[in-house]
């Protein structure tokens, strides 16, 4: 049993899928090395365009052991790759980050571990703050999805939070290893949302998911309209493939609430000229999502053109 006295004794392995990293990746590693609680290992899963011509990563000098594993681009999968990472670890806690999420301070891991004092908490995830390039709309979206107040979610909250009960993000999340293994781990194959699928399994398995607002990473995106379309197309695909999870919980209503709140926010800020951009962005998101939901009725060539994760469709003889 975990108690307040031995939280800091938990062994943590950090698992990071990497593909063509930029300078944020080194910033991430350097900040992990400054944490009050550091991981035992950093396991890097590096996707390569061509395994025969691997590009060696330049890792800064760290006090943490770093191990690099190479994966062919065609073998990458949002669920399967992270599942592979878990198989390489014997730590108490599996921690996942994306290569562009930078810890905001040295307390990230410590804060993520605190909820494990409750033995029913099986996963925790961090608050995402916008970076300096984020526009006003993206900043509000981050605040909407990652509010400043922490919460612990369980099956009892389904009526209150709906689809948000299953919300969890592997941009920065941790999982209690014994619960993760008991419930079968990440799905082998999914184009998107492996984190929420895992969270759904944990919630329905009687566990809790903790959102830790005090655990913070800098992470946001500047997407074009077409990129928003493609990203949300893949979102729709995952919702169709796991319809029992996502479609029964009414995920579209949450998107509508975000748009309405964003319009009100821009009006309150007197930033009226940004409303057309919000409407365009929301339109591309919605169109992509709706097409993704009906991907199984569309020509495969069209599906691949719409998708952000094109290699997903080339596996298992899908094309």
Image (spheres, rainbow, N blue to C red):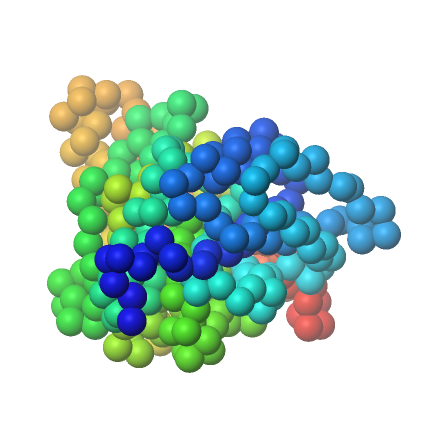
Q: Residue furthest front?
A: 5
Q: Quadrant of residue 20?
A: top right
Q: Residue 267 at what x, y percent from top left? A: 17, 26
Q: Nearer the viewer, residue 279 or 178?
A: 178
Q: Quadrant of the N terminus?
A: bottom left
Name the residue rendered at 32%, 57% in the picture.
7
Above/below status of 17 relative to 282? below
Q: Nearer the viewer, residue 129 or 249?
A: 129
| Residue 196 shows up from this direction | no
Question: In this image, 121 relative to 300: left or right?
Answer: left
Q: Residue 196 at what x, y percent from top left? A: 38, 63
Q: Residue 208 at what x, y percent from top left? A: 26, 67
Above/below status of 244 relative to 123? below
Q: Nearer the viewer, residue 111 or 263?
A: 111
Q: Quadrant of residue 244?
A: bottom left
Q: Quadrant of the C terminus?
A: bottom right
Name the residue rendered at 75%, 49% in the picture.
49
| Residue 140 shows up from this direction | yes
Name the residue rendered at 48%, 50% in the picture.
39
Name the residue rendered at 47%, 72% in the picture.
185
Q: Residue furthest right?
A: 52
Question: In this image, 249 relative to 41: left or right?
Answer: left
Q: Quadrant of residue 35?
A: top left
Question: In this image, 98 relative to 244: left or right?
Answer: right
């Amino acid at each position: 049993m975990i108690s307040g006295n031995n939280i800091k004794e938990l062994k943590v392995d950090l698992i990071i899928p990497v593909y063509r990293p930029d300078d944020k990746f080194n910033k991430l590693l350097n900040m992990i090395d400054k944490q009050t609680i550091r991981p035992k290992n950093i396991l890097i899963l590096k996707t390569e365009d061509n395994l025969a011509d691997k590009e060696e990563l330049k890792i800064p000098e760290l006090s943490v052991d770093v191990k690099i594993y190479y994966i062919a681009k065609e073998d990458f999968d949002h669920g399967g790759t992270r599942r592979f990472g878990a198989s390489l670890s014997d730590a108490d806690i599996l921690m996942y980050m994306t290569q562009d999420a930078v810890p905001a301070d040295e307390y990230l891991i410590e804060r993520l571990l605190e909820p494990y004092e409750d033995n029913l908490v099986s996963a925790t995830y961090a608050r995402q703050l916008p970076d300096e390039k984020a526009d006003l709309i993206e900043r509000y979206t981050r605040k909407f999805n990652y509010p400043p107040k922490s919460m612990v979610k369980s099956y009892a909250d389904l009526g209150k939070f709906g689809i948000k009960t299953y919300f969890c993000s592997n941009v920065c999340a941790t999982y209690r290893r014994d619960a993760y293994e008991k419930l079968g781990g990440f799905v082998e194959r999914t184009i998107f949302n492996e984190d929420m699928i895992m969270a759904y399994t944990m919630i329905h398995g009687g566990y809790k998911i903790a959102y830790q607002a005090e655990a913070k990473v800098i992470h946001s995106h500047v997407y074009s309209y077409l990129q928003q379309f493609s990203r949300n197309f893949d979102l729709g695909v995952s919702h169709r493939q796991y319809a029992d999870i996502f479609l029964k919980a009414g995920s579209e209503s949450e998107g509508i609430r975000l748009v309405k709140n964003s319009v009100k926010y821009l009006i309150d800020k007197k930033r009226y000229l940004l409303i057309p951009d919000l409407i365009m962005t929301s339109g591309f998101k919605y169109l992509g999502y709706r097409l993704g939901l009906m991907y199984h009725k569309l020509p495969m060539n069209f599906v691949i053109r719409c998708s952000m994760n094109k290699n997903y469709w080339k596996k298992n003889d899908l094309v």
